Image: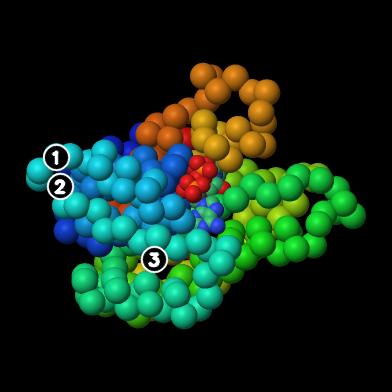
Amino acid sequence: MQNLKSFQPAPDALKDRVILITGATDGIGKALAIACAKLGAQVIAHGRNQKKLEAVANLVTDSSTRPMALLPLDFEKAGPAEYEAMTDAIETNFGHLDGLVHNAAMLAERAPIEHHDVPKWLRAMHVNTNAPFILTRYCLPLLKKSADASIVFSSCDVATDARAHWGPYLVSKWANEGMMRMLADELSNTKVRVNSIDPGVTSTKIRLQAFPAENRDALAKPEEVINGYLFLLSSSSKGTTGQQLAGN
Ligand SMILES: NC(=O)c1ccc[n+]([C@@H]2O[C@H](COP(=O)([O-])OP(=O)(O)OC[C@H]3O[C@@H](n4cnc5c(N)ncnc54)[C@H](OP(=O)(O)O)[C@@H]3O)[C@@H](O)[C@H]2O)c1
């Protein structure tokens, strides 16, 4: 797996690129949204909480950066019609998409298979795997309008190294790897590349839920793990597709 921690984007690496980031209200997605805006992108920040979205947008105060567009949608509750309305709004406002980052996810229960609550399992699979599918399905026409588009899935070490009790989080990450590879093959004759990236252990809400007793100060901060994402979203990664990469 190629490690992209040392990638350094040029100050205008994402100039004028229209990039949709899911789960931009916290953790890695929030750090990535801010970094993309500072590198010149038109960021479309997705989240389920309007107030948190506004707070993230307000963190980018530099007058030379474009204001973020905000897309509130709860992946647990939304149906296809809401995704379609969301992509219609992107088309009306921006005409196309250059980047789509499937970052939002929930950890869900960690337990032996026979102890899992079925509705909770289905909810996690819906947020972590069905939502990236539905969003990709509706965004593809907009991505195909770009001269250089990039779809990025969030991977995790549990997607290469299966281990007990990780429940729907692990299964959804394996499913997303399969979706990434299938999509890369389907789009191999287009200008849309598709990859996944494992940010590595990062101090965020999901990590805290998984390992509550861990010393958070010893972990990487979200701002320290995003260079790989910036590589995949910039033209530097042209020609890279179907790859599972490491960001830290
Ligand atoms: N942290 C790590 O060590 C690590 C390691 C490997 C991979 N990853 C991956 O990195 C990605 C980002 O995770 P993170 O660590 O930054 O965690 P995080 O801070 O908990 O961020 C998760 C994001 O997903 C959003 N989200 C959760 N459920 C949602 C729903 N139903 N609808 C819409 N949005 C929803 C959250 O929204 P709210 O702000 O409203 O909660 C938040 O913005 C995930 O795909 C994760 O699997 C993380």
User: What residue do we see at 68% from left, 23% from top?
Assistant: 213
User: What residue do we see at 43% from left, 35% from top?
Assistant: 222
Q: CA distance from mark 2 to mark 1?
A: 6 Å
User: What residue do we see at 64% from left, 23% from top?
Assistant: 214
Identify the residue position indicated by label 2 in the image. 65
Q: Residue furthest right?
A: 114
* Element class at badge 2: loop
Q: Nearer the viewer, residue 171 or 88?
A: 88
Q: Is mark 3 within 8 Å of ligand 1?
A: no
Q: Position of residue 44 (x, y in %)?
A: 30, 59
Q: Position of residue 29 (x, y in %)?
A: 41, 46
Q: Position of residue 90 (x, y in %)?
A: 29, 71
Compared with residue 207, is residue 104 higher up or lower down, i.e. above or below? below
Q: Nearer the viewer, residue 116 or 28?
A: 116
In which quadrant of the rendered view does residue 62 lie? top left
Q: Position of residue 237 (x, y in %)?
A: 33, 55
Q: Is mark 1 within 8 Å of ligand 1?
A: no
Callout 1, which amino acid?
A: Asp
* Element class at badge 3: strand
- Report if the CB atoms under discs 1 and 3 are less than 8 Å apart: no
- Report if the CB atoms under discs 3 and 2 are less than 8 Å apart: no
Identify the residue position indicated by label 1 in the image. 62
Q: Nearer the viewer, residue 231 or 76?
A: 76
Marks 1 and 3: which is nearer the front?
1
Callout 3, which amino acid?
A: Arg
Identify the residue position indicated by label 3 in the image. 193
Relative side of 165 to 160, left or right = right
